[in-house]
Amino acid sequence: MVAVRPPSGPRLACKTPGQLSSRRQEQASAVVSARRATTLLFGATPPAPAPSRRLTSTLLAAATPPGPAQQQQQQPPPPPPGPAQQQQQQPPPPPPAAPPPVYPDTLTDRAFIALCRLSYGKLAGWQSPRAWWDGPESYKGMVEVSRALMRGRPTAAAQRGAVIAGFPSVPPWFRRAFPYSQWGAELNARITPAFFAWLVGPASVASGPVDGGAVQASTVKIERCRYLAESGCVAMCANLCKGPVQAFFTDELGMPLTMVPDFETYGCEMVFGKTPPPLAEDPGLGVGCLGDCPTGRSDGGGGACWQLGGGVGGGGLPPSSTSE
């Protein structure tokens, strides 16, 4: 057998339960003595320990009443408006209408207006009494004379024919010497805003599709056609401008031209290089009288200004009543 030797070194003394109890009694007596001494010195018991900051914040938040912003957040959302309230909520009024444009007619512009007015007067056999060298007045006189031209020719074909007869004649060799080309179409598009602003107003050149699907810079965008806005008549636009000009460029000059007027905005697009459809099949011309058409008001019926299907042009005002 192997003998087990106890570990060497100092031995720890173990305390008995009686010794532990006496030690605790001594500690308790010391605490009581300290409290009595504090009472004798200060006349009060020592203050209790201060609460922690987190506990203080929680107690203050619970005791403080909610403010206006918190009350608004705690309130439930209002119910959706009913049918009666929806009817009372009227939409905002529309913005005011834009003032009519002012055209700065130069001396050259007034000369061209006077020449066009003279040409229409010869075809109509009547001339407006308005002033000649006041740009806006002379332009109104030109529109009155063109309206008198419509009055003397009841059919749309006769009206277009009269205007085409006033265009210069083109010799047969012109089309052989200057056949259609993209360069020619784009040149016509660049010339139009520069030389015809007196007639149609401001315009710009843009790119667009032409015959064959090609895209080229031969489209003229007219912001607000001066002639259409001044006349206010679909028939005058179609029979005295769109139809004759398309026919002259396409048939006489060999330069296909399609004009697309917008009777809501008074704008227009002129596409050089695009063959126009027959007027009877043009989808943009099945339009009745415009709201401010003087011809429609003079007829009193408020009906269509003209209809391509019947081949009848707008009535137009008589020469004695063309002044506005």
Image (cartoon, helix red, strand yellow):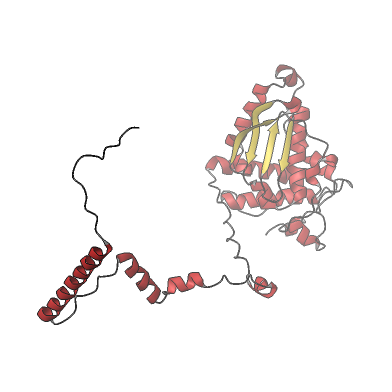
- Above or below for 14 versus 115: below
In the picture as drawn, the residue positioned furthest to the right comes out as 310
- Would you say residue 254 is visible in this rendering? no
Residue 18's spot in the image, x, y percent? 25, 65
**Residue at point 70% right, 72% down?**
83
In the picture as drawn, the residue positioned furthest to the left comes out as 41
In this rendered view, identify the residue nearer to me: 43 or 216. Answer: 43
In this rendered view, identify the residue nearer to me: 265 or 47. Answer: 47
**Residue at point 67% right, 23% down?**
182
- Above or below for 169 versus 323: above
What quarter of the picture does the N terminus occupy?
A: top left
Residue 197's spot in the image, x, y percent? 59, 40
- Would you say residue 161 is visible in this rendering? yes
In the picture as drawn, the residue positioned furthest to the top comes out as 177
- Left or right: 22 as drawn, with respect to 194: left
Residue 202's spot in the image, x, y percent? 58, 42
